[in-house]
Image (cartoon, grey):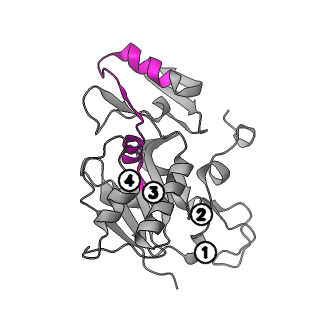
Amino acid sequence: MSKPLTIIPIEGIGEIRPGDELDALIAAVFGEHAATPLLDGDVLVVTQKIVSKAEGRMVMLDHDDSEAKVALVESESVRILRRRGDLRICETTHGFICANAGIDLSNVEAGTAALLPVDPDRSARRLRAGLARLLSVSVGVVISDTFGRPWRQGVTDVAIGIAGIAGVIDLRGSEDAGGRELVATEVCVADEIAAAAELVMGKASGVPVAIVRGVPEAWLRESSVSAEIIRSAGDDLFR
């Protein structure tokens, strides 16, 4: 029988500044008197925004200067797949296919923009190691960001960096409920965890961290977005 899954918003992180020790700031929220402790086996979901802020991935940008925005987007891209007005669908250095190279103008100080972390998987590993050192817990870490999806309206959060949690669970060779062999089913559980956490973090509530508690123990292993989730151009039918 599956365990129940619990999603818990974590408040009290405060405003993040460049150079802040993000692991220490998050660990402080989980002190001995915290209403919600961080437990072994939890998955901590952290928004890209606070990771980028802590890592100094902020640049000056006039939000009303469309030419400057386009220039910044193109400087953060290795390839532009589509253009429409100021919108660019880009391939980033990480291998992500996303709008405007993942550059974020929301929930940042006026006149600034947040760039994606240089290596989100490495950022997740560092945060996981820091929490293990400070709190003596073994947790998974997902760094989440908001992406659109081809052919579907709306956005959802996905994993752009992971540590200690599987990216994809391969169900090929197992059987479905009717006893039929699954031949093509691979589930991106890291993206599912990121999307689930966003339900309690929201876009304007000031909650940049959430716990997803109760994931199967088998999912708690070393992985990375770059190794498991990014689809190579050779396997992509649309590039």
Does 14 lie within the magenta span? no
Q: Earlier in the sequence, mark 3 or mark 4?
A: 4
Counting residues from the N terminus, which is met first, the one under dot 2 or under dot 3?
Answer: 2
Residue 104: image x %, image y %?
Answer: 38, 35
Q: Is residue 58 above or below residue 26?
A: above
**SS at circle 1:** helix
Reading the image, the residue beneath label 3 is: 194
Amino acid type of the residue tagged 1 in the rendering: Ala
* Dot 2 crowding, Cα within 10 Å, few <14, some 14–19, many 20+: many
* The C terminus - image quarter: top right
Tag 1 residue:
218
Would you name the residue on which mark 4 appears?
A: 22
Mark 2 to mark 4: distance in Å? 23 Å
| Residue 194 rendering spot, x and y as whole percentages | 45, 57
Could you say which is closer to the camera, residue 112 or residue 127? Answer: 127
In the picture of the structure, the residue carrying the numbered disc 2 is: 166
- Mark before the other along the chain sequence, 2 or 1: 2
Magenta stretch?
A: 46-74
Left or right of residue 163, residue 109 in this image: left
Q: How many marks?
A: 4
Q: Is residue 110 above or below residue 125?
A: above
Give the mark nearest the N terminus, 3 or 1.
3
Q: Secondary structure at mark 3?
A: helix
Image quarter of residue 163? bottom right
Q: Nearer the viewer, mark 3 or mark 4?
A: 4
Q: Amino acid at mark 3?
A: Ala
Magenta stretch: includes residue 52? yes
Name the kind of residue labelled 2 in the image: Ala
State the residue at coordinates (39%, 16%): 68
Q: Earlier in the sequence, mark 4 or mark 1?
A: 4
